[in-house]
Amino acid sequence: MQGEDDLRGLAKIMAFMRAVSIIIVLMHLYWFCYGFFLEHSWTLELVNKILANFNRTAGLFEHTLYTKIFALVLLALSCLGTKGVKNEKITWGKIYMVLSPLTGSTW
């Protein structure tokens, strides 16, 4: 019984980490593509102030790479905490093949 509760709690934490990484990516898009959002009148002064204060205190938007790395780390940690399928046929070789820009495969 205790093990099931622990697994449920871990699953909630992992889902929260995934949600935070998605929110960070959305904040990244809003911050660095602000001209596009302004052109379409999709900006809010409250969001601008929140992101400006967040940038001032954390410095997350000082460079475009910082937010991407932070979101990627959170996403990787959330993937590490979830259990996968036992008989999965995914190998490191297949992962490297997909990630390699030399494969030339199209999605």
Image (cartoon, grey):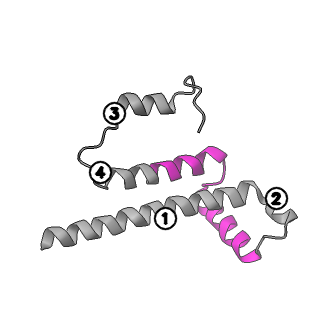
**Place of residue 25 in the rendered image (x, y in percent of width and height, measured from the top left):** 60, 57
The residue at which mark 1 appears reads as 19
Callout 3 environment at 10 Å: few (<14), some (14 to 19), or many (20+)? Answer: few
The answer to which quarter of the image holds residue 65 is: top right
Asked if disc 3 and disc 1 are in contact, CB closer than 8 Å, the reply is no
Specify which label sits upstream in the sequence, 2 or 4. 2
Mark earlier in primary sequence (2, 3): 2
* Marks 3 and 1, the one that precedes in the sequence: 1
Quarter of the image that includes the N terminus: bottom left
Q: CA distance from mark 3 to mark 1?
A: 27 Å
Residue found at x 45% / y 60%: 18
Report the amino acid beneath label 1: Ala
Decide: is 45 above or below 30: below
Query: Label 3 belongs to which residue?
Result: 91
Observer-side mark, 2 or 4, equals 4
Tell me the residue that label 2 is attached to: 36
Majority SS type along the magenta span: helix
User: How far, Cα to Cα, is label 2 from label 4?
Assistant: 39 Å
The earlier-in-sequence mark between 2 and 1 is 1
Residue that badge 4 annotates: 84
| Residues at marks 1 and 4 touching, judged by CB atoms closer than 8 Å | no
Give the CA separation, mark 3 to mark 4. Answer: 13 Å
Position of 49 compared to 71: left or right? right
Check disc 2 and give the amino acid type: Phe
Q: Secondary structure at mark 3?
A: loop
